[in-house]
Image (cartoon, rainbow, N blue to C red):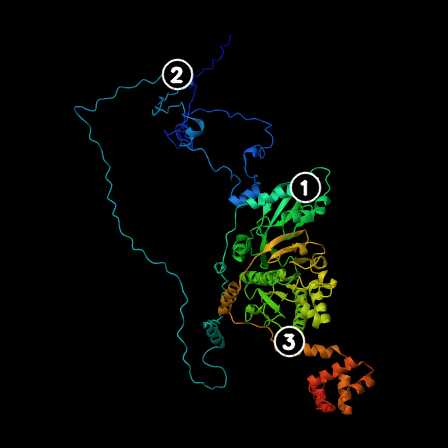
C-alpha cells in the first residue's frame, strides 16, 4: 500500500479579539460642566421658592380689552394710538408690584429663604475595561527604588548655544518716477534738414512733462435754516375737561327730547374744535341727527356746529362743536418732527396744521399737484400761504427750488424779496403777472422737449439721469408759482390769465411746475370751471355763504367754520378739518434774512423784460398792427376815424392800435384838439418792425 503524503499543518496562533473602548473626552470645557443655578426672580430676588410650576390658563375668557372697562376711568386706547402717545402699548401698567409693595398687596410670605450653599457632588471616574473572552488584567510591576548603590551616569546631548542676532529692519524700496532736469532753452539753429535730437525723443519729452491741473472752484454749501428759529407752545393734554363733559350731557339730553335712540360714546378734543362721536341704535336714520342741528346749536350755546354723517371709516356720526377754551397751534410744533425734516424723498412736503385727533397734517405739493386756497378776509388765508412758503424754504436750496410770487396787494409777500430762490422779484403789476405766467407756460414746453430728447418721463427721472452721468447738464429745479389774489388778475387780464392757468394745471405736473392760487372772493366769475376742474386739492377757510362753499369744495361745510385758521382740506379721499399753524412775521423775516446772508438774488429775468414781453404780446396779438402802421406813415395822418374806414374795424380796436403806435413812438401823443403827428419815415418804420434788410 502506498503511503499517503502527510501535509504538515502550521500552528498559527490567533490574536485575541478585543473591542477597544474609547474614553469619553471632556471637550473644551474640561471639568466645568453646565449646571442649572437657583432661580432668581427679576422683581423679588431670592425670596421666592425654587419650584417649577405649570401656569393655569383659562380659555374662552372673552374680549380681553373690555374685561377691565368697569375699573377704567378713561377708554382704553388702541395699540397704534398708545404707541404714538406714550411710546408703548402697555401704558396702563404703571404701578408694577415690587419687592417692597408685595406685602402690601398679597400679605406676608410663609417662605423663609435658606442661605445654605449647595454642595457639589464629585463623581469618581470609572475605568472602562476592554471586552474579550480571555482577557487578563495587566500585572503592575513593582517600581524599583530610586536609591541604588551604583547609578548609571546619564547622558546629556550637547547642543551649541543659539545667538540672537538683531536684524536691522530695512525700509521697503519702491520704484518711483524720477523727474528729469528741465531742458534749458537753446538758441534756434537753422540747418538744411533734421536736428541733433530725434523727433521721437522730443515727443516723448513733451509727453513726460507734468500737465497743469485745472482749478475748479468748489460749490458753495447751502446751510438750511434752523428749527430753533420757531417758537413752540405746549398743548393742553387734558382730554376730558369739565366743560366737555357738560356738553356731552347736553347732547344726550337733546336726543332724549326728540326721541332719538342715540348717545355720545367718545369725544376727540382738538385745538379749537371737539368732535363728539354719536352711536345710533339699529333702525335709526342718520338724517334725524342732521334735522336737529339748529336745536343742538341752541342748547349748546355755540356759534356754529358741523355734522359729519357718518364719519368716514367709523360707524359713528360726528358732531363738531367749538371749544370753550381755544389753543393756538405754533408752526414750530408742526415742523419739528422726523416725519417732516427727515423725509428727503418728498422735498415739496409742506406743513399745514393739526387735525381734531391731534395729528400733524402734511401735504406733498407733488401729489396735489396744484392747490386752490380760498376764504374771506381775516380767516387765515395769508398765514396759510406763508406757512407753505416757509416750509418749502426749510427743505430746499436755491438749486432745488425756484419761486414765482405774484402779489397784487403789494404787502403780503414782501418779506420774500431778494431771495435766491426767486426767478424774478415779487410781481405786483397785473400785466407783468400775465407775462410771468406766459413765461411759465413756455418753460413747461421747453422742459418737455428736453425730456423727449433725453429719454425721461418727468423731472424725477431726468434728475436721476443727471446724477448717474447719463445726461451732461445741470439739475432741473422745481418751480412753484404762488398767486396771492386771483380776483385782481381776473379783473384786468382775464383771458390771458385763465388761458395760462388752464395750460399749467393740465400739463405742468410732470415738468415740475406747480401752481398755488389764493383768492378772497370764491365766486364763479373768479374761480371758473376751467380753472377748478384741473385743481383737485382745495383748502377752504371761513366763507360768507353756502354758495361760496360749493364753489370751493363742491359741497357745504366752509360756511360753518370758525375763522382764524380753521380750515377744510379736500383731497381725493375725504375732507379733513384742521387748525392751521400760526407763524408770526418775526419768524418769517428771521428765515428770509438768514437765507439772504448766504446768497445774493439770482434772477432769471427782471421786471423790465416782463414789460417788454407784455408789450410785444399785445402787438403780436393784433394782426392789423403792421398794416395800420404803414397806412399811417404813408398817409401822414393818424386819425382814428380814417383807420376805422380803411380797415372796417370798431372804435375800440382802432383806439388800441393808435395807442400801440404811440408806445413805439411812431406817432406823437394826444395834443387835445390837434391831430397826432407822424414821427418816422417808411425806412425808420421798417427798422422798428425788424423788416429792414
Query: Which residue sits at x=56%, y=44%?
Result: 81
Q: Are marks 3 and 2 in contact (CB under 8 Å)?
A: no
Residue 604 tag number: none
Q: Earlier in the sequence, mark 1 or mark 3?
A: 1
State the image coordinates of residue 672 (x, y, percent, origin top left). Answer: 72, 89
Give the structural element (helix, strand or loop) at label 2.
Answer: loop
Q: Is 216 drawn above or below residue 249 in the view shown? A: below
Q: Nearer the viewer, mark 3 or mark 2?
A: 3
Q: Badge 2 is on which residue? A: 135
SS at circle 1: helix
Residue depicted at 50% across the width and 56% down the height: 232
Residue 391 seen by the camera:
yes
Residue 84 in percent (x, y) is at 54, 46
Give the mark nearer the N terminus: 2 vs 1: 2
The correct choice, above or below, for 480 with respect to 622 in the image is above
Specify few, some or many for label 3: CA neighbours under 10 Å numbering under 14, 14-19, or 20 or more.
many
Above or below residue 437? Residue 302 is: above
Mark carried by residue 255 = 1
Q: Is residue 639 left or right of residue 488?
A: right
Q: Position of residue 410 (x, y in %)?
A: 60, 71
**In the foreground, 335 or 174:** 335
**Which label sits in the foreground, 1 or 3?**
1
Which image quarter holds the C terminus? bottom right
The spot of residue 550 in percent (x, y) is 72, 57
Q: Which mark is residue 610?
A: 3
Q: Residues within 10 Å of mark 1 (few under 14, many from 20)?
A: some
Mark 2 burial class by Cα count in 10 Å: few <14, some 14-19, many 20+: few
Q: Nearer the viewer, residue 344 or 172?
A: 344
Does the image show residue 315? no
Q: CA distance from mark 2 to mark 1?
A: 104 Å
Q: Residue at x 69, y 66 (%)?
A: 501
137 left or right, relative to 266? left
Amino acid at each position: 500500500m502506498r503511503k499517503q503524503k502527510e501535509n504538515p499543518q502550521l500552528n498559527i496562533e490567533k490574536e485575541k479579539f478585543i473591542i477597544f473602548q474609547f474614553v469619553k473626552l471632556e471637550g473644551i470645557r474640561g471639568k466645568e460642566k453646565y449646571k442649572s443655578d437657583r432661580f432668581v426672580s427679576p422683581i423679588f430676588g431670592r425670596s421666592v421658592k425654587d419650584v417649577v410650576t405649570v401656569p393655569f390658563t383659562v380659555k374662552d375668557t372673552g374680549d380681553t380689552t373690555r374685561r377691565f372697562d368697569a375699573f377704567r376711568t378713561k377708554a382704553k386706547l388702541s395699540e397704534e394710538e398708545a404707541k404714538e402717545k406714550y411710546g408703548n402699548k402697555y401704558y396702563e401698567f404703571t404701578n408694577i408690584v415690587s419687592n417692597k409693595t408685595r406685602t402690601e398687596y398679597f400679605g406676608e410670605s410663609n417662605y423663609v429663604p435658606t442661605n445654605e450653599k449647595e454642595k457639589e457632588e464629585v463623581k469618581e471616574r470609572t475605568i472602562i475595561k476592554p471586552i474579550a473572552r480571555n482577557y487578563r488584567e495587566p500585572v503592575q510591576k513593582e517600581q524599583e527604588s530610586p536609591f541604588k548603590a551604583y547609578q548609571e551616569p546619564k547622558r546629556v546631548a550637547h547642543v551649541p548655544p543659539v545667538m540672537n542676532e538683531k536684524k536691522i529692519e530695512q525700509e521697503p524700496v519702491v520704484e518711483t518716477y524720477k523727474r528729469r532736469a528741465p531742458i534749458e532753452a537753446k538758441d534756434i539753429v537753422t540747418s538744411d534738414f533734421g536736428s541733433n535730437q530725434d523727433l521721437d525723443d522730443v515727443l516723448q519729452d513733451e509727453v513726460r512733462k507734468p500737465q497743469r491741473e485745472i482749478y475748479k472752484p468748489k460749490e458753495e454749501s447751502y446751510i438750511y435754516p434752523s428749527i430753533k428759529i420757531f417758537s413752540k407752545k405746549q398743548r393742553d393734554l387734558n382730554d376730558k375737561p369739565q366743560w366737555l363733559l357738560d356738553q356731552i350731557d347736553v347732547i344726550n339730553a337733546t336726543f332724549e327730547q326728540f326721541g332719538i335712540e342715540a348717545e355720545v360714546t367718545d369725544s376727540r378734543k382738538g385745538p379749537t374744535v371737539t368732535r363728539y362721536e354719536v352711536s345710533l341704535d339699529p333702525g335709526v336714520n342718520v338724517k334725524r341727527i342732521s334735522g336737529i342741528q339748529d336745536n343742538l346749536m341752541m342748547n349748546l350755546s355755540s356759534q356754529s356746529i358741523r355734522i359729519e354723517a357718518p364719519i368716514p371709516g367709523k360707524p359713528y356720526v360726528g358732531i363738531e362743536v367749538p371749544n370753550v377754551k381755544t389753543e393756538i397751534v405754533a408752526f414750530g410744533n408742526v415742523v419739528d418732527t422726523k416725519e417732516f425734516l427727515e423725509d428727503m424723498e418728498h422735498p415739496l412736503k409742506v406743513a399745514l396744521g393739526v387735525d381734531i385727533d391731534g395729528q400733524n397734517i402734511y401735504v406733498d405739493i407733488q401729489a396735489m399737484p396744484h392747490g386752490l386756497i380760498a376764504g374771506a378776509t381775516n380767516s387765515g388765508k395769508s398765514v396759510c400761504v406763508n406757512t407753505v412758503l416757509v416750509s418749502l424754504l426749510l427743505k430746499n436750496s436755491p438749486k432745488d427750488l425756484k419761486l414765482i410770487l405774484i402779489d397784487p396787494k403789494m404787502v403780503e409777500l414782501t418779506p420774500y424779496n431778494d431771495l435766491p430762490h426767486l426767478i424774478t422779484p415779487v410781481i405786483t403789476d397785473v400785466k407783468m403777472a400775465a407775462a410771468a405766467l406766459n413765461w411759465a407756460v413756455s418753460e413747461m414746453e421747453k422742459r418737455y422737449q428736453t425730456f423727449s430728447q433725453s429719454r425721461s418721463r418727468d423731472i424725477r427721472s431726468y434728475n436721476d439721469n443727471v446724477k448717474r452721468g447719463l445726461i451732461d447738464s445741470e439739475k432741473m429745479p422745481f418751480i412753484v408759482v404762488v398767486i396771492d389774489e386771483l380776483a385782481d388778475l381776473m379783473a384786468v387780464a382775464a383771458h390771458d390769465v385763465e388761458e395760462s392757468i388752464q395750460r399749467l394745471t393740465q400739463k405742468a405736473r410732470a415738468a415740475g411746475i406747480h401752481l398755488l392760487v389764493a383768492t378772497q372772493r370764491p365766486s364763479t366769475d373768479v374761480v371758473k370751471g376751467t380753472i377748478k376742474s384741473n385743481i383737485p386739492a382745495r383748502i377752504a377757510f371761513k366763507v360768507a355763504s353756502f354758495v361760496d362753499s360749493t364753489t370751493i369744495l363742491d359741497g357745504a361745510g366752509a360756511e360753518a367754520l370758525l375763522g382764524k385758521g380753521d380750515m377744510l382740506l379736500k383731497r381725493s379721499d375725504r375732507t379733513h378739518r384742521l387748525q392751521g399753524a400760526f407763524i408770526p412775521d418775526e419768524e418769517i423775516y428771521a428765515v428770509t434774512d438768514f437765507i439772504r446772508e448766504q446768497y445774493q438774488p439770482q434772477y432769471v429775468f427782471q421786471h423790465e423784460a416782463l414789460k417788454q414781453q407784455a408789450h410785444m404780446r399785445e402787438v403780436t396779438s393784433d394782426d392789423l398792427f403792421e398794416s395800420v402802421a404803414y397806412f399811417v406813415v404813408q398817409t401822414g395822418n393818424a386819425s382814428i376815424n380814417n383807420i376805422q374806414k380803411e380797415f372796417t374795424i370798431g372804435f375800440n380796436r382802432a383806439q388800441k392800435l393808435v395807442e400801440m403806435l404811440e408806445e413805439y413812438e411812431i406817432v406823437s401823443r394826444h395834443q387835445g384838439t390837434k391831430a397826432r403827428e407822424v414821427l418816422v419815415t417808411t425806412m425808420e418804420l421798417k427798422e422798428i418792425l425788424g423788416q429792414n434788410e
